[in-house]
Amino acid sequence: MTVKGEVITDEDQDLWYLRQLDGGLFTLQTVDYILGWIMTEDDGVSTTYSIVLKRFGLTGCQIRTHAVQMLNRKDQGLRSIVQTLQIYHDNAEEQGDPANEEPIQKQILSSLIEALDS
């Protein structure tokens, strides 16, 4: 890969990604992962965490709407969560079943990204 005429090696890209993880990307990915699942599974969340939701005056079906409103206040949106999860997906490496094309973690992230993008 070349950026501004400079050749960027795979090793350089890996080092840059590790630096970003140390700088807060890991936390952002984790928060976006959890928030993404809460927004896509809000019916299950509403029954499991009904006491917490009642405290904030929310029902399960309102979680996604409320999260989007909070993101909009900071000029963000679902797209920013999807972008963070896509970076997570692109850099996820794990041993998968040789019969499958993608490792399990990548499959889960792909499904989550697809659900948030719809």
Image (cartoon, rainbow, N blue to C red):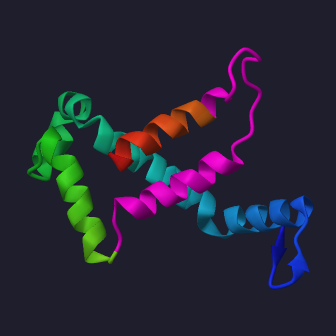
**Residue 58 appears at what percent x and percent y?**
11, 48
**Residue 52 appears at what percent x and percent y?**
20, 43
Q: Quadrant of residue 53?
A: top left
- Magenta stretch? 76-105
Residue at 46% x, 54% y is 31
Total numbered circles: 0
Residue at 32% x, 77% y is 74
Q: Is residue 74 left or right of residue 94?
A: left
Residue at 26% x, 71% y is 72
- Viewport quadrant of the C terminus: top left
Residue at 62% x, 57% y is 26
**Residue 84 appears at what percent x and percent y?**
53, 58
Q: Is residue 92 left or right of residue 32?
A: right
Q: Quadrant of residue 95?
A: top right
Image: 28 above or below 89: below
Q: Quadrant of residue 59?
A: top left
- Viewport quadrant of the N terminus: bottom right
Residue 98 drawn in magenta = yes
Image: 34 above or below 105: below
Front residue of this view, candidates 61 and 46 = 61
Q: Is residue 4 left or right of residue 101?
A: right
Q: Residue furthest bottom?
A: 4
**Residue 8 appears at what percent x and percent y?**
88, 71
Residue 8 drawn in magenta = no
Front residue of this view, candidates 93 and 34 = 93
Image: 36 above or below 66: above
